[in-house]
Amino acid sequence: MLRSYIDHCSKEGFVKECGSEVFLDITKHDDKSIVEEVEMTTGGLGASAAMVCTASNKAYAQAIDFLRFGGTLVCVGVPEGKLEPIASAFRLV
């Protein structure tokens, strides 16, 4: 399994020392190109799992788009401001 990390460029050295094989600098991408970059690094499949450790509502919404079919989103941080459902998510009933 390929271990990737998406964050600000200031963290690249640290996360590579911790074992990340791919680092994507979020400051070099817009919403569409970061999803395309994740798809490219996963051979077009998308990520098996994404872990969001931030207070950014936008990061939670973006992470859904990184996942492959049946992928897992782990939410660790607490979103900022008013709690909102992730717009692109759906519940399985």
Image (tube, rainbow, N blue to C red):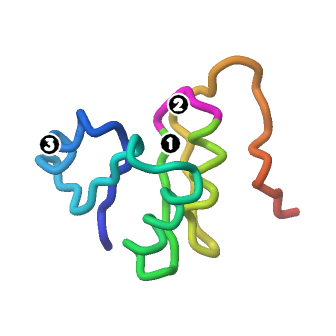
Pick whichever of labels 2 and 3 is earlier in the sequence. 3
In this view, 62 is above or below 1: above
- The residue beneath circle 3 is 13
Asked if the magenta segment contains residue 55, the reply would be yes
Q: Looking at the rendering, which quadrant does residue 10 occupy?
A: top left
Quadrant housing the N terminus? bottom left
Identified at 43% across, 65% down, the residue is 37
Q: CA distance from mark 2 to mark 3?
A: 22 Å
* Mark 2 or mark 3, whichever is nearer to me: 3
Q: CA distance from mark 1 to mark 2?
A: 7 Å
Q: Is residue 74 left or right of residue 81?
A: left
Q: Amino acid at mark 1?
A: Val
Q: Looking at the rendering, which quadrant does residue 2 occupy?
A: bottom left
- Secondary structure, mark 1, is strand
Q: Disc number at residue 21?
A: none
- The residue beneath circle 1 is 52
Q: Amino acid at mark 2?
A: Gly
Q: Amino acid at mark 3?
A: Gly
Identified at 79% across, 47% down, the residue is 87
Task: Looking at this view, name the residue that lies furthest to the top.
Answer: 81
Q: Disc number at residue 77?
A: 2
